[in-house]
Image (cartoon, rainbow, N blue to C red):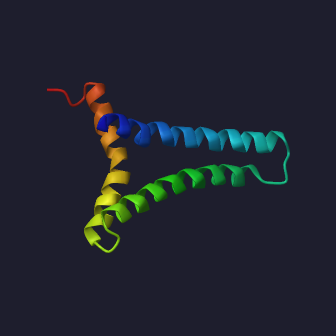
């Protein structure tokens, strides 16, 4: 289950955010809206970053808002999924197998 979370939060969600940013910018340029396409793309990326930020704060608050260790653990838990996904991919592709 931990590997599934690493794949979802370390790869699938960032890819979905990037695709949404690209499609939003494309739609803004095609529809000739008053909003520049870069702003639409930045808004989609900011929304994705906000999701990670909410995960970070909720994880730290659950462990104790005034404990320094809870903030460190929240950082490692949320942002460590990228490196965890990288390790899983290396294993799946055969680079880390004995």
Name the residue nearer the viewer: 2 or 16.
2
Q: Residue at x 34, y 39 (%)?
A: 85
Image location (x, y in percent) of residue 7: 39, 36
Q: Quadrant of the N terminus?
A: top left
Residue under the point 57% across and 43% down? 17
Residue at point 29%, 65% (across, down): 70
**Within the image, what quadrant is residue 11 found in?**
top left
Residue 48 coordinates in the image, percent (x, y): 55, 50
Quarter of the image where the C terminus is located: top left
| Quadrant of res 72 | bottom left
The number of discs equals 0
Say above or below: 25 vs 90. below
x and y, in percent, of residue 56 in the image: 41, 59
Q: Nearer the viewer, residue 71 or 49?
A: 71
In the image, residue 52 sits, relative to residue 72, either above or below, namely above
Could you tell me residue 32's position as x and y percent?
Answer: 85, 45
Q: Residue at x 59, y 55 (%)?
A: 46
Q: Nearest the camera: 15 or 52?
A: 52
Q: Is residue 73 left or right of residue 82?
A: left
Q: Residue furthest bottom?
A: 66
Compared with 11, 69 (above or below) is below
């Amino acid at each position: 289950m931990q590997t599934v979370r690493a794949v979802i939060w370390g790869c699938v969600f960032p890819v979905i955010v990037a695709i949404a940013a690209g499609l939003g910018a494309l739609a803004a340029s095609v529809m000739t809206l008053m909003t520049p396409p870069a702003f639409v793309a930045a808004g989609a990326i900011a929304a994705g970053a906000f999701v990670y930020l909410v995960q970070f704060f909720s994880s730290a608050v659950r462990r104790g808002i005034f404990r320094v260790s809870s903030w460190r653990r929240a950082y490692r838990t949320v942002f460590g999924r990228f490196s965890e996904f990288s390790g899983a991919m290396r294993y799946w592709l055969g680079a880390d197998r004995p």
